[in-house]
Image: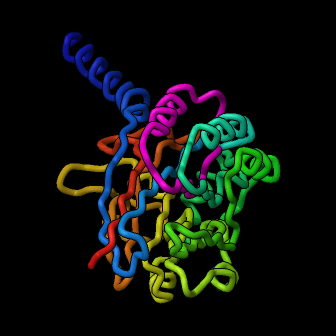
Amino acid sequence: MIGIIAFCFCYICSFLFYIFIIEPRRFRLKRVRIPMRGLPVRELRILHLSDLHLRGKERAKLRFIEKLSQFDFDFAVLTGDTIDNDSGINACRKVVSMLKPRYATLIVLGAHDYYDLTAWDMLDHLIHFNQPRRMSIRNSIEKLIEALTDEGAIVLRNSSFTTRVNSSKLTFVGLDDPYIERHDLQSALREADNDSFRILLVHTPELLREISARRIPLIIAGHTHGGQVRFPAIGAVTTRCSLNPKYASGTFRIGETILHINNGLGTGRFTGFRLFCRPEASLLRLVREE
């Protein structure tokens, strides 16, 4: 009997050690090839990072991101929840300084960038899932934005950025986070150049149908953490928003729009576990579909 209890105890401890310590640090780079109709250039490479949830020194995560700088990519995009609280701002600055895209690093914000969520906030969100989010503690959002822009990043808050790639115009549209109702799709698109190829960046993919109705060719989003817990033959149980769990991670075509979401690189302070859902970054290779 004692042997059975000891075995069960060791098994439970090993399982907890794996999901809280091992799996959250098994970072990987996922390479994704996406054929795109109307892409103005033959090929475009985008490094996608999401949900870093930086806090403190984050040595392991920074070492992984530093390795990503050796790859060749045209743009780096960060789709929100870059920090968990103000202690992650310095690590966030290091992330942007390490990335070396050919053209630009573009960032949109998530709820955790604005607020340091408490345990009570998390419980309240679970209880009142479909109600407006209430947050207790504000982060120093202006300090975060200053740190990002000091390193050359472009922060898009319901705005757009247009540049030329091989003489062809490309526009990134950035939405503020729908999760905390800071988005303004109309304002963001008002600034966008309608004659250029448009890519929309947003943290929470809550507005998928509304965005795809605007005929945006590509949406890059985060927030879901890939479900964070996935089961064989079932997949993710939740997306932590109204999106169907089948969209928790991957690349999907919805009408004329393609949606890409990855598993993200971090987890929240009070939900620091993963199961069958490795943290990841994506290297998107967009290729023109003839």
Residue placed most toward the observer, 159 or 41: 41
Q: Give the range drawn in magenta.
A: 55-83
Q: At 49% from the left edge and 39% from the top edge, which residue is drawn? A: 69
What residue lies at 53% left-to-right and 72% top-to-bottom? Answer: 167
What is the quadrant of the C terminus in the image? bottom left
**Of residues 183 and 138, the one drawn nearer to the viewer in this rendering:** 183
Q: Nearer the viewer, residue 4 or 41?
A: 41
Residue 189 position within the rendered picture, expressed as x and y whole percent measured from the top left: 63, 82
What colour scheme does the image use? rainbow
- Above or below, 98 against 189 in this view is above
Nearest the viewer among 83 and 36 is 36
User: Which quadrant would the N terminus be assigned to in this image?
Assistant: top left
- Residue 233 at what x, y percent from top left? 17, 55
Q: Is residue 152 left or right of residue 274?
A: right
Residue at point 66%, 49% (across, down): 120
Q: Is residue 30 left or right of residue 92?
A: left
57 inside magenta stretch: yes
The reply, left or right, for residue 20 in relation to residue 185 is left
- Residue 129 appears in the figure: no
Q: Does residue 53 lie above or below 188 as drawn?
A: above
